[in-house]
Image: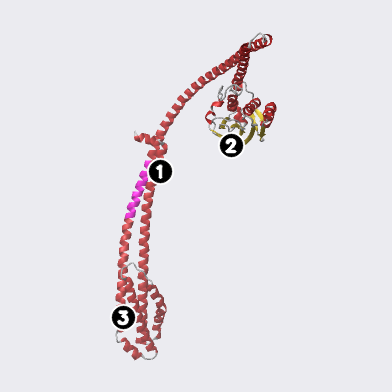
Amino acid sequence: MHVKRLFGNTTATWVIISVIVVGIIGTNLSIALNTVNQLSTVQTDLDKTSNIIVRLESLHLSVVVAESGQRGYLLTEYEEYLNPYHAELQTLDEKIALVRNIKSDVAGQKERIDDLLVLIGEKITELTSTVDLALEQREKSALRQIMTNRGRDLYREIRKTMQQLIGSEYQHRQTLYTQLKSIQRDAKVNFGVSAVTSGLLVIGMFLMARINLRISNRYQDDLEEQNELLQEKVDLRTQELTVYSEELSRSNRELEDFAFVASHDLQEPLRKIQAFSDRLTTIYKDQLDERGVDYIKRMTTAAFRMSTLINDLLEFSRITTRGKEFVEVELNSVLDEVLGDLEIAIAETGAQIEIAPLPKVCADPSQMYQLFLNVLSNGLKFHKVDVAPVISVSVEQKELRDELQHVDVPSCIVTIKDNGIGFEQTYADKIFSPFQRLHGRTAYKGTGIGLAVCRRIVERHGGTITALSSPNEGAEFTITLPIDAVVNKYMGE
């Protein structure tokens, strides 16, 4: 079960294969590099000891040739024998320097070489002194010096030391040859093992690939089967949603018709109530006492409030159902129209309204007018006693992330700030719900549906509206509207 699950995971399978391949290749490569390094080291040591032997034998040969030339000249007095003697003396210093620079891996060789060079120096001195005596016509003195056997004894010491040096190097070279053969045998074994493991690796990879392919095909078949089942469910759900959408559209049409009929049927009795109350006040005013007049006044006020409430409810319900198509709207023109309609209220309160240049957006022009009219009216309505309202409208444009569509939407953020009475921040969301009032009807007029209408308008345009306030510190409304026509059109449908 675990193996099946493992091979069913394609990524895990190939990760494991990759690790095994890299591990085996790395091991084989490490073995090969180690073998090559050992072979290279032994070969270098062999070249080194062979070079030492050549230098020692070359120096030994020069001493022998020089001594042979010396003895031949002394015995025959033929100067031809001095030619090899002089030739070897000329190269002797270079050969001595080469031997002096020898760095052997054999223990004790350095001391033996120093002793050898001392002996060779004495030997050269002995050779040159006898030849010089003979050249000065002092052959008897030269022969007498040779007969002392000092030269013979020096050469014996030189040959003995030379044999020790060369013998040690030959012995060391033999040891290196033995190591080389051992490394070669190990290399053959290692390369054979590497070849076998590589072959097994190739076979294993082939088998794992086939197993993985077979399981992948099986999972692919299962996936296709699941996709078919899912497609059937999606088609079924789509049909259900289509039916539901049609039923919802029919229900909305029926609700709209009902709202229209209800508003018409309700408005007619209210108009009659208002008309008859006006007649009672006009015709029978002198016959009514103070209590009767108060009752009629209350009835008229209630009827007017009921009529206003019905109109506001109709307006709230028709934001989506009877919204106009989105077009390019110049918000500055909308604000100018709103300020024109609020001219009397602005004059009565002595309000100061500062508006920054606003951008163009793709929106419903009438709803933009209604949105800014409601928010600015609130700023004028809820002002402090004996304090003139000051309202500022500012704007900022930026890219905002749409989490549903996963795109960045060019948007404008309009901030409307006033210096009014404000409210507790805990009610910041409540004020956007229908019929939610923070003050009594006698203190401020209204049905408590204006900001709910604003939220519906903004949401239809794919934006948001929030409020920030504290008591006696004024209120700040932030309206975010997408600028992109495509997004607005989609949200408005």
| First in sequence: mark 2 vs mark 1 | 1
Depth check, front residue: 225 or 384? 384
* Circle 1 Cα neighbour tier, 10 Å, few/some/many (<14 / 14–19 / ≥20): few
Q: Residue at x 49, y 24 (%)?
A: 234
- Per the model, the C-alpha gap separating discs 2 and 3 is 102 Å
- Per the model, the C-alpha gap separating discs 2 and 1 is 44 Å
Task: Give coordinates of residue 93: x percent, y percent.
Answer: 40, 77
Residue at image mark 1: 18
| First in sequence: mark 2 vs mark 3 | 3
Residue at image mark 3: 154
- Secondary structure mostly seen in magenta is helix
| First in sequence: mark 1 vs mark 3 | 1
Do the CB atoms of the residues marked 2 and 1 lie less than 8 Å apart? Answer: no
Camera sees residue 245: yes
Question: Residue type at mark 2?
Answer: Glu
- Per the model, the C-alpha gap separating discs 1 and 3 is 71 Å
